[in-house]
Amino acid sequence: MRRVRGTRAASVGTALVASLALLSGTLLAGCTADPEPTPPPADPGVPASGFRLVAFDSCADALAQLRSAAKAYVGPYGFGDGGRQRGGPEFQGSDAGGTDRAAAADSAGAKGAVAPSYSGTNTHEAGVDEPDLVKTDGRRIVTVSRGTLRVVDPASRQLTGTLKLDSGPEGGWSDANLLLHGDRALVLIRGQNMGVFDGIRRDGEVPPIDRDAITGPRLVLVDLAGPPKILGEYRFDGDLVDARQVGATARVVVRSGPRLEFPLNKNDGPVNEKKNLAANRKIVDGAGIDAWLPRYQTVTPDGRTSTGRVGCDRLSRPAVYSGTSLVSILSFDLGTASLGDGDPVTVAADGDTVYSNGPRLYITSDQRWRVLPTLDRSNLAPEAKDEQTEIYQFDTSGPGRPRYITAATVRGWVINQYALSEFDGHLRVATTSGRTWGDNPKSSSTVYVLRADGRTLTETGRVTGLGKGERIYSVRFAEGIGYVVTFRQTDPLYTVDLRNPKAPKVTGELKITGYSAYLHPVGAGRLIGIGQEANSQGRTQGTQISLFDVSDLTKPTRIAQHHVRFGHSEAEFDPHAFLYWPATNSLVVPLNSPGAASTAGRAQPNSGALVLRVTDGGFTESGRVDHAEVQPDQTGQRDGTIRRSLMIDGVLWTVSDGAVKATDLATLGTLGVIRI
């Protein structure tokens, strides 16, 4: 079972409890007097803190082992949701400078001119881009929303290109994001697989499975040199987890499951669980290797298609696995005129979180499929002894297929990609152990330090006992220092000194009400946090933006707070919505605050972008930008809710589903509105 991500912090707990209650009951209902299959044993001699992937001997060997593993986890209701009802990938991150300098340099080199000053996507690591719904290279702004890609010229402030993409399921639009390189855009469109592999849709109906259809993520390569046009398309079985881009090379991570159709709900009336369980195991036993191996399909602009399948020689397995999930890494060169076959490499494991520093890419699997069967129906079990996160490390220093290096396990679960960071030859990982929903006095958090020497991941030190009875809400690593926020009723901000990898230590702790869901270093010993204010009982009270002084690691302090009652910001759960522009010390975040007023008591629009100036001593509110010019269309899907902001040549651009707007940052006066 994997966590529901990409939702507001206030709703995560509710959704998670519901999912866990449903799935734990499902798994426990599968226990009968019949002998239970056992998963493949761990490889002997492989320590828990560092293990290896093993290639299958043959397709026959792979099939036998995958069947055995899957039978151990199938129940009378199939595989549960298999994690495929999650909300989507974690497109999160932050470049402290807010500027894609590498892209600017590439653009300048290509044009033989000085590149304009512009902000890139807020990413975890400088030089490692992440998909988002808007991209800019300073020469153009590219957006994708409601099934359409659009190109805006920031110099003329005109819409210069439009490209309709196919609609999603049932005539709607699937979620989509972009990567950009030169005159190429890669559009990543979420697939339609969620909740289908086990034969049950989320609406409770049982659709017929078209075993020949590949309905997973759709990747579209677009040429932007002139009017936007499609150069090629690519589909892959599964669900999109995340993607990273360095230079022209894009790595796309996809999670897939076996294409098996279980009989649940095909008969009206009571379910005979024992009979269903036996039938489901028989279905697993009768499945061929094609049911597990992911397939892909490429489409040329003239409609010619070709299909392929990940070969058994590209499939590896860890020591323990469920047989219900495979994770694949696809590689694409955005500098070419086609996408190719993605050169896939696949692991018989799960994929929840992706982190990359460029030369290396990490995929984590939090192993909840092993933990849930140990919980009772009321979800009151204190904690499972084997709760752990597996970490897979790949070498992505070259443009070709990633090379698997090593793997490791740490106890507990990571919240998002910010819980991982590689620096000076060491990977730091922050986890929470113990049941992380409800009131659990036994939960606590740990920061692990693992030596990453290119061959193994070996633990050199750890810091334990952070936030007892709480869970991690945000993490940020800045070179040799870590910042960890835990929360239940108050918000301890911990400073962790990691400069000695063998002896990491907590150096300071600050307790305030509320929590920070995202942390952003801004230099000179300052740290910005955005999250929710809360009362002394932990009840949230609206968006708060905090400025911390962390120059003295032993005494972190909050020197300023900006609180908007009843407010919510997308930046609280998606850092791509966060913009810090160091040239003017400006902070811009989307903000929804129905019926609220700012701390200064002035009336504010319900939806817009909040603009703050960050000074050494605090925040000064410049005002808000809104898209009041945008009127909802007949479907109600086109509106002026601002989701992103960016800077180009001193102009603030804000993006909603209905418009791209240019604003003078100094006066917040409107310079132009492009309706889209």
Image (cartoon, rainbow, N blue to C red):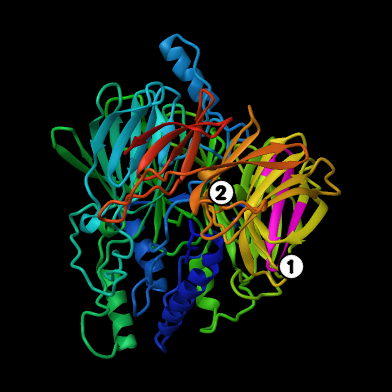
Horizontal side of residue 401 vs 151, given as left or right: right
- When the figure is inspected, residue 418 is found, relative to residue 262, above or below; the finding is above
- Residue 163 is left or right of residue 394, and the answer is left
Asked if the magenta segment contains residue 130, the reply would be no
Q: Residues within 10 Å of mark 1 (few under 14, many from 20)?
A: some
Q: Position of residue 393 (x, y in %)?
A: 54, 44
Pointer 2 residue: 417
Q: Residue at x 45, y 34 (%)?
A: 245
Asked whether 135 or 387 is in front, the reply is 135
Position of the C terminus by quadrant: top left
Give amino acid for label 2.
Gln
Mark 2 burial class by Cα count in 10 Å: few <14, some 14-19, many 20+ = many
Q: Position of residue 174 (x, y in %)?
A: 30, 51
Tell me: residue 397, above or below residue 10. above
The residue nearer to you, when weighing 315 against 127, is: 127
- Give the percent coordinates (x, y) of residue 261: 25, 69
* Relative depth, front residue between 330 and 130: 130
Q: Is residue 403 above or below residue 2?
A: above
Q: Is residue 510 above or below residue 160?
A: below
Q: Which mark is residue 652?
A: none
Secondary element type, mark 1: loop
Horizontal side of 304 relative to 217 (left or right) equals: left
Which residue is denoted by mark 1 in the rendering? 468
Instruction: Please check the rendered image and state whether residue 478 is part of the magenta-colored stretch, yes or no.
Output: yes
Q: Which residue is at 61% across, 71% downward?
A: 435
Residue 278 point in image, percent of width and height: 31, 81
Inspect the image, locate mark 1, and give the three-letter code of the amino acid beneath it. Lys
Region of the chain picked out in magenta, as a range: 477-494
